[in-house]
Amino acid sequence: MTDAPTLPTVNREWHLLSRPVGWPKPEDFALVEAEVPTPREGQVLVRNLYLSVDPYMRGRMSAAKSYVAPFELGKVMQGGAVGEVVASNAEGFEAGDHVLHFLGWREYAAVSAEHAVKVDPNAAPLSTYLGVLGMTGLTAYAGLLRTASFKEGDVVFVSGAAGAVGSQVGQIAKLKGASRVIGSAGSEEKVKLLTEEYGFDAAFNYKDGPVGEQLRAAAPDGIDVYFDNVGGDHLEAAIGSLNEGGRIAVCGMISVYNNTEPAPGPKNLARLIQTRGRIEGFLVGDHYDLQPQFVQEVGPWVASGALKYRETVVEGIENNLEAFLGVLRGDNTGKMIVKL
C-alpha cells in the first residue's frame, strides 16, 4: 500500500438524523466527527477536494420508494465528489492521482477502485468533473438529444435554465442548430445571464407573471422541445405551447420536492392528443453509454469557450448543508460546488 507520510485522524462527515417533512431543517442533520478510514484491499483513501450538492438528494432524504435507495438515518450521506488519492491499497492507483467518485458529504472517503474514475486536473479544472464535464453535463446531453429527440431547427424551452443542467441544455441546443431557445429563471440577473452570456434567444423571470403567458410571448410559434427541471406551472405552460409532434423530457421537478401534499397535475394533458405530443422521464444512469460521445463532443466546446459554464462555490465542509439548501432555493447560478 502506498500512502502519504501523515494523515489526519479526524474525518468530518454529514449524517441524516431524521427524514425531513417539507423543507429540510438544520436539525434533521448533523456534522459528525469520525475516524479517517483505512483503505481495505482494493480501495483507495481519497481526500475530497470538491463536493456536489444536487436537487435529487432531497428525494434520497425521504423513505419513499424511488429509483435509488434512501439515505440511511444516522449514517453519512452520499454524493458526487472529486479528490486526491492519499493512500492506495488498489492496483492501478497511486497517491497523487485524482479521482471522481460518489462518497461525498465527508472530508475523507475509502473508495473501492471499481467506483473511482481517474480524472486529469491538467485537462480541465477538477470542479468541472462534477458539472459541465460530469454527470450534470451528461444529463443535459442525454436528455436533450436522446430523450427529447432534438433535431436541427427545433424551438426549445428550458426551465431552471440558469442552473447547472439547464444552462447546458440551452447551449447544446444552440450549438446543434436550434432555431430558437427560450429559458426561464428566477431573477433578472439570471435572465440577463441566459441571453447575454449563454446565447439564449429569449428568457423570462417566472416570478414576473403567469409562465404560460410569458412563454407564449417568447415563443409565439410554439415549442418543439421542453426540457423540464421545474414541473408545476412550467410543465402546464409547455404543454400549452407544444407544437405538433412536440417532446417533453422530464429531468426534475424541483417545484414539488418539498411539498407535503401531492401537487396537482397539469390541467391540459388532453392537449397531448391534439399535438401527438410525448412526455418522457429519464435518469442519467440509463445513458452512461453516451459518456464517450459526450466527452468527445462537449469537451472541445468547453475548452474553446463555445460552451460556457458558471459555478457557485461554497467553502468548507461545515457549509455543505447550507449549500444544498441553497440549491433548493435557487441561490446558485450554474453548478453548486462545495470546496474543501
Image (tube, rainbow, N blue to C red):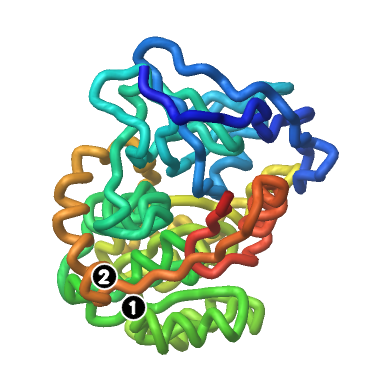
> Circle 1 sits on which residue?
181
Label 2 crowd bin: few (<14), some (14–19), many (20+), radius 10 Å: many
- Residue that sits furthest to the right in the current view: 27
135 versus 154 height, above or below: above
The kind of secondary structure element at disc 1 is: strand
> Circle 2 sits on which residue?
173
Label 1 crowd bin: few (<14), some (14–19), many (20+), radius 10 Å: many
Asked whether the residues under the numbered discs 1 and 2 touch, taking CB atoms below 8 Å apart as contact, a structural biologist would say yes
19 versus 316 height, above or below: above
- Residue 234 vs residue 62: left or right? left
226 versus 283 height, above or below: below
Of pointers 1 and 2, the one earlier in the residue sequence: 2
Residue lying at 54% horizontally and 30% vertically, measured from the top left:
6
Residue lying at 36% horizontally and 51% vertically, measured from the top left:
129
- Residue 223 vs residue 238: left or right? left
Distance Cα–Cα, label 1 vs label 2: 7 Å
**Residue 293 rendering spot, x and y as whole percentages:** 15, 50
Q: Note whether residue 257 is visible.
A: yes
Front one among 100 and 240: 100
**Residue 225 rendering spot, x and y as whole percentages:** 32, 65
144 versus 27 height, above or below: below
Give the quadrant of residue 220: bottom left
**Which amino acid type is marked by label 2?**
Ala
Front one among 215 and 191: 191
Q: Note whether residue 277 is visible.
A: no
The kind of secondary structure element at disc 2 is: helix
**Which amino acid type is marked by label 1?**
Val
- Residue 219 vs residue 27: left or right? left
